[in-house]
Image (spheres, helix red, strand yellow):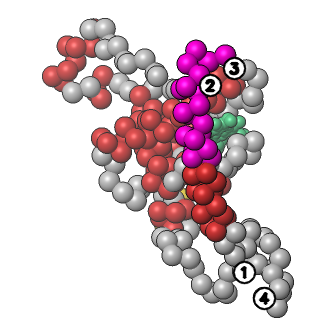
Amino acid sequence: MPRNPKAAVASRPVAMAVVLVTLAVAGCRQDMHDAPRYEPLEASTFFADGRGSRMLVANTVARGMLREDDHLYQGKINGQLTDVFPMPVTEEFMARGRERFNVFCSPCHGQTGQGNGMVVQRGFRAPPSYHEARLREAPAGYFFDVMTHGFGAMSDYAAQIPVNDRWAITAYIRALQRSQQATIDDVPVGLRANLDEPAPQEEPEP
Ligand code: HEC
Protein backbone atom coordinates (compact mmCIF):
# COMPACT_ATOMS: atom_id res chain seq x y z
CA MET A 1 0.00 0.00 0.00
CA PRO A 2 1.35 3.51 -0.80
CA ARG A 3 1.84 5.48 2.35
CA ASN A 4 -0.17 8.39 0.95
CA PRO A 5 -3.10 7.05 -1.12
CA LYS A 6 -4.08 10.58 -2.27
CA ALA A 7 -0.68 11.10 -3.88
CA ALA A 8 -0.97 7.81 -5.74
CA VAL A 9 -4.34 8.85 -7.18
CA ALA A 10 -3.03 12.28 -8.17
CA SER A 11 -0.09 10.77 -10.07
CA ARG A 12 -2.28 8.63 -12.30
CA PRO A 13 -3.23 11.44 -14.76
CA VAL A 14 0.43 12.41 -14.89
CA ALA A 15 1.38 8.87 -15.88
CA MET A 16 -1.31 8.88 -18.58
CA ALA A 17 0.02 12.16 -19.93
CA VAL A 18 3.53 10.75 -20.13
CA VAL A 19 2.27 7.74 -22.09
CA LEU A 20 0.31 9.95 -24.50
CA VAL A 21 3.20 12.32 -25.10
CA THR A 22 5.54 9.37 -25.70
CA LEU A 23 3.15 7.88 -28.23
CA ALA A 24 2.74 11.22 -29.96
CA VAL A 25 6.49 11.76 -30.23
CA ALA A 26 7.07 8.20 -31.46
CA GLY A 27 4.36 8.80 -34.06
CA CYS A 28 6.19 11.83 -35.48
CA ARG A 29 9.37 9.82 -35.83
CA GLN A 30 7.66 7.20 -37.92
CA ASP A 31 7.57 9.53 -40.95
CA MET A 32 11.35 9.71 -41.08
CA HIS A 33 11.65 5.97 -40.50
CA ASP A 34 9.48 5.16 -43.47
CA ALA A 35 10.97 7.72 -45.86
CA PRO A 36 11.28 6.14 -49.29
CA ARG A 37 14.93 5.18 -49.85
CA TYR A 38 17.02 2.18 -50.85
CA GLU A 39 18.85 0.11 -48.29
CA PRO A 40 22.45 -0.63 -49.36
CA LEU A 41 22.42 -3.11 -52.29
CA GLU A 42 18.60 -3.29 -52.31
CA ALA A 43 16.98 -4.28 -55.63
CA SER A 44 15.25 -1.58 -57.68
CA THR A 45 12.55 -1.70 -60.31
CA PHE A 46 13.36 1.86 -61.36
CA PHE A 47 16.73 1.19 -62.99
CA ALA A 48 17.01 -1.13 -65.98
CA ASP A 49 19.76 -3.26 -64.38
CA GLY A 50 17.64 -3.85 -61.26
CA ARG A 51 20.25 -2.43 -58.84
CA GLY A 52 19.42 0.21 -56.27
CA SER A 53 23.13 1.04 -55.77
CA ARG A 54 24.53 2.63 -58.92
CA MET A 55 27.85 1.72 -60.53
CA LEU A 56 30.56 4.40 -60.70
CA VAL A 57 30.31 6.44 -63.85
CA ALA A 58 33.08 5.38 -66.24
CA ASN A 59 36.15 7.67 -66.47
CA THR A 60 35.21 9.74 -63.45
CA VAL A 61 36.97 10.19 -60.12
CA ALA A 62 35.10 10.89 -56.92
CA ARG A 63 35.86 14.22 -55.29
CA GLY A 64 38.99 13.99 -53.13
CA MET A 65 39.99 10.63 -54.59
CA LEU A 66 42.31 11.81 -57.37
CA ARG A 67 45.70 10.31 -56.49
CA GLU A 68 47.88 11.50 -59.30
CA ASP A 69 50.86 12.46 -57.15
CA ASP A 70 52.99 9.29 -57.14
CA HIS A 71 55.46 10.80 -54.71
CA LEU A 72 52.83 11.43 -52.05
CA TYR A 73 50.62 8.39 -52.65
CA GLN A 74 53.13 5.72 -53.73
CA GLY A 75 56.45 6.93 -52.34
CA LYS A 76 57.84 6.97 -55.89
CA ILE A 77 59.47 9.50 -58.18
CA ASN A 78 59.71 8.43 -61.83
CA GLY A 79 58.59 4.96 -60.84
CA GLN A 80 61.40 4.50 -58.27
CA LEU A 81 60.92 4.40 -54.50
CA THR A 82 62.40 7.62 -53.18
CA ASP A 83 64.26 8.66 -50.05
CA VAL A 84 62.80 12.18 -50.25
CA PHE A 85 59.82 13.05 -48.05
CA PRO A 86 56.97 14.79 -49.90
CA MET A 87 56.43 17.19 -46.97
CA PRO A 88 58.68 19.00 -44.49
CA VAL A 89 59.75 16.82 -41.57
CA THR A 90 59.12 19.02 -38.55
CA GLU A 91 59.36 18.22 -34.86
CA GLU A 92 55.56 18.10 -34.67
CA PHE A 93 55.41 15.70 -37.64
CA MET A 94 57.97 13.46 -35.98
CA ALA A 95 56.00 13.46 -32.71
CA ARG A 96 52.88 12.47 -34.62
CA GLY A 97 54.84 9.66 -36.28
CA ARG A 98 56.05 8.41 -32.95
CA GLU A 99 52.55 8.39 -31.49
CA ARG A 100 51.08 6.58 -34.53
CA PHE A 101 53.99 4.13 -34.65
CA ASN A 102 53.40 3.20 -31.04
CA VAL A 103 49.72 2.64 -31.77
CA PHE A 104 49.93 0.70 -35.02
CA CYS A 105 53.37 -0.84 -35.40
CA SER A 106 54.93 -1.36 -31.98
CA PRO A 107 52.58 -4.24 -31.04
CA CYS A 108 54.62 -6.37 -33.47
CA HIS A 109 57.74 -4.37 -34.28
CA GLY A 110 58.41 -3.28 -30.69
CA GLN A 111 58.83 0.31 -29.49
CA THR A 112 62.43 0.40 -30.70
CA GLY A 113 61.78 -1.51 -33.94
CA GLN A 114 63.72 -4.63 -32.96
CA GLY A 115 60.81 -6.84 -34.02
CA ASN A 116 60.00 -8.08 -30.54
CA GLY A 117 56.60 -6.46 -29.83
CA MET A 118 54.09 -7.97 -27.44
CA VAL A 119 52.15 -9.74 -30.21
CA VAL A 120 55.36 -11.45 -31.27
CA GLN A 121 56.17 -12.39 -27.68
CA ARG A 122 52.79 -14.11 -27.64
CA GLY A 123 53.63 -16.17 -30.71
CA PHE A 124 53.03 -14.08 -33.88
CA ARG A 125 55.69 -14.37 -36.55
CA ALA A 126 58.62 -12.06 -35.79
CA PRO A 127 59.24 -9.27 -38.30
CA PRO A 128 62.81 -8.35 -39.22
CA SER A 129 64.53 -5.70 -37.09
CA TYR A 130 64.48 -2.19 -38.61
CA HIS A 131 68.14 -2.00 -37.65
CA GLU A 132 69.41 -4.60 -40.05
CA ALA A 133 71.52 -3.12 -42.85
CA ARG A 134 69.02 -3.94 -45.60
CA LEU A 135 66.24 -1.90 -43.94
CA ARG A 136 68.57 0.90 -42.86
CA GLU A 137 69.54 1.32 -46.47
CA ALA A 138 66.01 1.05 -47.84
CA PRO A 139 64.61 4.39 -49.06
CA ALA A 140 61.92 6.13 -47.00
CA GLY A 141 59.44 5.35 -49.77
CA TYR A 142 59.92 1.65 -49.05
CA PHE A 143 58.40 1.98 -45.56
CA PHE A 144 55.54 4.00 -46.99
CA ASP A 145 55.06 1.26 -49.59
CA VAL A 146 55.00 -1.56 -46.99
CA MET A 147 52.34 0.31 -44.97
CA THR A 148 50.33 1.06 -48.12
CA HIS A 149 50.44 -2.37 -49.78
CA GLY A 150 51.49 -4.76 -47.01
CA PHE A 151 54.44 -7.14 -47.17
CA GLY A 152 54.36 -10.95 -46.94
CA ALA A 153 52.70 -11.95 -43.68
CA MET A 154 52.05 -8.30 -42.76
CA SER A 155 48.77 -6.85 -43.97
CA ASP A 156 48.55 -3.31 -45.29
CA TYR A 157 47.52 -0.32 -43.19
CA ALA A 158 46.16 1.85 -46.00
CA ALA A 159 42.64 1.79 -44.56
CA GLN A 160 43.66 2.48 -40.97
CA ILE A 161 46.42 5.06 -41.44
CA PRO A 162 45.91 8.17 -43.61
CA VAL A 163 48.61 9.06 -46.16
CA ASN A 164 50.25 11.87 -44.14
CA ASP A 165 50.42 9.70 -41.04
CA ARG A 166 52.11 6.92 -43.03
CA TRP A 167 54.83 9.43 -43.92
CA ALA A 168 55.04 10.62 -40.32
CA ILE A 169 55.55 7.01 -39.17
CA THR A 170 58.23 6.62 -41.83
CA ALA A 171 60.03 9.68 -40.47
CA TYR A 172 59.89 8.25 -36.97
CA ILE A 173 61.23 4.86 -38.14
CA ARG A 174 64.16 6.78 -39.64
CA ALA A 175 64.76 8.35 -36.22
CA LEU A 176 64.57 4.94 -34.54
CA GLN A 177 67.12 3.58 -36.98
CA ARG A 178 69.39 6.53 -36.39
CA SER A 179 69.02 6.16 -32.62
CA GLN A 180 70.55 2.68 -32.69
CA GLN A 181 73.52 3.80 -34.78
CA ALA A 182 74.34 7.05 -33.05
CA THR A 183 77.91 8.03 -32.26
CA ILE A 184 79.29 10.77 -30.03
CA ASP A 185 79.51 12.97 -33.14
CA ASP A 186 75.70 13.04 -33.28
CA VAL A 187 75.55 14.78 -29.90
CA PRO A 188 76.03 18.56 -30.07
CA VAL A 189 79.31 19.45 -28.33
CA GLY A 190 77.55 21.61 -25.74
CA LEU A 191 75.33 18.70 -24.62
CA ARG A 192 77.97 15.99 -24.33
CA ALA A 193 78.57 16.80 -20.67
CA ASN A 194 74.94 15.85 -19.99
CA LEU A 195 75.39 12.30 -21.26
CA ASP A 196 76.26 10.93 -17.85
CA GLU A 197 73.07 12.26 -16.34
CA PRO A 198 70.21 9.78 -15.95
CA ALA A 199 67.71 9.92 -18.81
CA PRO A 200 64.58 11.96 -18.06
CA GLN A 201 61.69 9.71 -17.05
CA GLU A 202 58.96 9.50 -19.65
CA GLU A 203 55.31 9.81 -18.77
CA PRO A 204 53.95 6.28 -18.44
CA GLU A 205 51.73 5.18 -21.34
CA PRO A 206 48.07 5.69 -20.48
C1 HEC B 1 50.47 -7.80 -36.58
C2 HEC B 1 51.89 -7.61 -36.56
C3 HEC B 1 52.46 -6.43 -37.35
C4 HEC B 1 52.11 -5.12 -37.26
C5 HEC B 1 51.05 -4.48 -36.37
C6 HEC B 1 52.96 -4.41 -38.19
N1 HEC B 1 53.81 -5.28 -38.80
FE1 HEC B 1 55.28 -4.82 -40.10
N2 HEC B 1 55.75 -6.77 -40.29
C7 HEC B 1 55.16 -7.82 -39.60
C8 HEC B 1 55.71 -9.08 -40.04
C9 HEC B 1 55.32 -10.47 -39.52
C10 HEC B 1 56.66 -8.78 -41.02
C11 HEC B 1 57.48 -9.76 -41.84
C12 HEC B 1 56.59 -10.22 -42.98
C13 HEC B 1 57.22 -11.26 -43.87
O1 HEC B 1 58.45 -11.30 -43.99
O2 HEC B 1 56.44 -12.02 -44.49
C14 HEC B 1 56.69 -7.31 -41.13
C15 HEC B 1 57.55 -6.61 -41.94
C16 HEC B 1 57.65 -5.24 -41.99
C17 HEC B 1 58.67 -4.51 -42.69
C18 HEC B 1 59.88 -5.12 -43.40
C19 HEC B 1 59.65 -5.53 -44.79
C20 HEC B 1 60.93 -6.21 -45.30
O3 HEC B 1 61.43 -5.77 -46.34
O4 HEC B 1 61.42 -7.16 -44.66
C21 HEC B 1 58.41 -3.18 -42.51
C22 HEC B 1 59.21 -2.01 -43.07
C23 HEC B 1 57.24 -3.07 -41.69
N3 HEC B 1 56.80 -4.34 -41.38
C24 HEC B 1 56.67 -1.89 -41.28
C25 HEC B 1 55.56 -1.82 -40.45
C26 HEC B 1 54.95 -0.58 -40.05
C27 HEC B 1 55.46 0.79 -40.42
C28 HEC B 1 53.90 -0.90 -39.25
C29 HEC B 1 52.91 0.03 -38.59
C30 HEC B 1 52.16 0.86 -39.50
C31 HEC B 1 53.85 -2.34 -39.15
N4 HEC B 1 54.86 -2.85 -39.90
C32 HEC B 1 52.91 -3.04 -38.40
C33 HEC B 1 54.18 -7.70 -38.65
C34 HEC B 1 53.53 -6.52 -38.31
User: Which residue, given by chain and number where applicable, does mark 1 sit on?
Assistant: 55
Select label 1 or label 4 by which is in front. Answer: 4
Q: Residue at 70% x, 69% y: name it.
A: 34
Q: Position of residue 90 (x, y in %)?
A: 30, 46
Work out how far the residue at label 1 is from the one at label 4, CA to CA, in angstroms.
11 Å
Note whether ligand 1 is within 8 Å of mark 2.
Answer: yes
Q: Residue at 50% x, 56% y: name it.
A: 163
User: Which residue, given by chain and number where applicable, does mark 3 sit on?
Assistant: 121
Select label 1 or label 3 by which is in front. Answer: 1
Q: Nearer the viewer, residue 123 or 83?
A: 123
Q: Are the residues at dot 2 and dot 3 in contact (C-beta closer than 8 Å)?
A: yes
Q: Amino acid at mark 2?
A: Gly
Q: Position of residue 114 (x, y in %)?
A: 58, 26
* Residue 8 visible, this angle: yes
Image quadrant, ligand 1:
top right
Counting residues from the start of the chain, the first of labels 2 and 4 encountered is 4
Secondary structure mainly formed by the magenta segment: helix
User: Which residue, given by chain and number where applicable, does mark 4 sit on?
Assistant: 47
Q: Amino acid at mark 3?
A: Gln
Work out how far the residue at label 1 is from the one at label 3, CA to CA, in angstroms.
46 Å
Q: Which residues are magenta?
A: 1-19
Disc 1 element: loop
Q: Is residue 88 above or below residue 114?
A: below
Q: Quadrant of residue 131?
A: top right
Q: Position of residue 155 (x, y in %)?
A: 70, 46
Disc 3 element: helix
Q: Nearer the viewer, residue 181 or 144?
A: 144
Select label 1 or label 2 by which is in front. Answer: 1
Q: Amino acid at mark 4?
A: Phe
How crowded pointer 1 is (Cα within 10 Å; few <14, some 14-19, many 20+) is rated as few
